[in-house]
Amino acid sequence: MAGKKIGVVLLNMGGPESLDDVEPFLLNLFSDREIIRLGPFPFLQKFIARKIVKKRAPKSRAAYQLIGGGSPLARISAEQGRALAARLAGEGEFMVRCAMRYWHPLAEEALAEFQRAGVRDLLALPLYPHYSRATSGSSFNDLRRALAATDYNFSCREITAWPDQPAYAAALAATIKEGAVAFGDAPFTLVYSAHSLPVSFIEAGDPYLDHIKRTIAAVEPLLGFGGRLCFQSRSGPVRWLAPSTPETLRELADAGVKNVLMVPISFVSDHVETLYEIDIQYRELAHGLGIRLVRPPALNTHPRLIEALAELVLSHTR
């Protein structure tokens, strides 16, 4: 790729940008058979998905209403892309665009931009540091389908995961230390809250849990202290990774813990899981249990996160 203009495709989930977007966004999400199989046959997937979405949409709209009327994920991802492009300026010719899995800008929209700019050589970089078939895997497959559907002669390399990239670990450690300042000299417990995943995925070989643990192993030497891992955002009647975040908060309250620093370990951007689940739901739960819950700032456009992304791009294009 050296000497050519390179298109960097930042892969992420996407989110509804308005309350009117919530239902079609959820339909795209639940129609993805790669993350959830609804019914025994593929042709039933969208039919069952519509029924589920009709029930879930009002609750989801209420959650998005509480965080400003929509998800900031596309906006933050675009800001990360612009910051990455600025960091890469002078390192070569790069064009950075986002491709969202379940909402705009979709992969085909990003590819159309690259085609108009005459860019053929692409590097796909997920904004998920930890690989799972439910996140990065589905996004890669979606991008591959979009590439196959165009008659433009793209080439595309993929960065599958980066759970212990040094600048990323340093960014997390810096935000954890920043969040800890809120407690002064008072003792606190560090809690890593990761997005949950069905246990069946891990049993089938999904590396997500191992990647989360690799991130923690990279961060804790920079902190000088350790924390507890738990899992949020469960949905559906299957066996999920445990313990859940609410269970962990209750266990800590029973042990007399009064201060919790909760780090959304599997997210690099603010969205509904941080702004609603942690900042509203879990904070209210913690308050009722006599715990003060503080969340460090999300990485968003943290300079060390942008440096991590730049180092990943440069290491795969030189």
Image (tube, grey):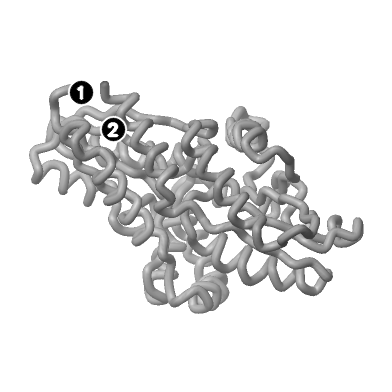
Image quarter in which the N terminus is found = top left
Q: CA distance from mark 1 to mark 2?
A: 9 Å
Residue lying at 39% horizontally and 55% vertically, measured from the top left: 102
| Residue 254 visible, this angle | yes
Judging from the image, what secondary structure is the residue with disc 1 in? loop
Look at the picture and state if 163 lies above or below 284.
above
Residue holding disc 2: 123
Q: Are marks 1 and 2 in contact (CB under 8 Å)?
A: yes
Image quarter in which the C terminus is found = top left
Please state the horizontal and vertical placement of residue 217, each as a whole percent of the image. 65, 32
Q: Amino acid at mark 2?
A: Leu
Look at the picture and state if 12 lies above or below 283.
above
Q: Dot 2: within a 10 Å radius of its alpha carbon, few (fewer than 14), some, or many (20 or more) residues?
A: many
Look at the picture and state if 221 lies above or below 49.
above
Residue lying at 38% horizontally and 73% vertically, measured from the top left: 18
Residue holding disc 1: 1
Number of numbered tags placed on the structure image: 2
Quadrant hosting residue 6: top left
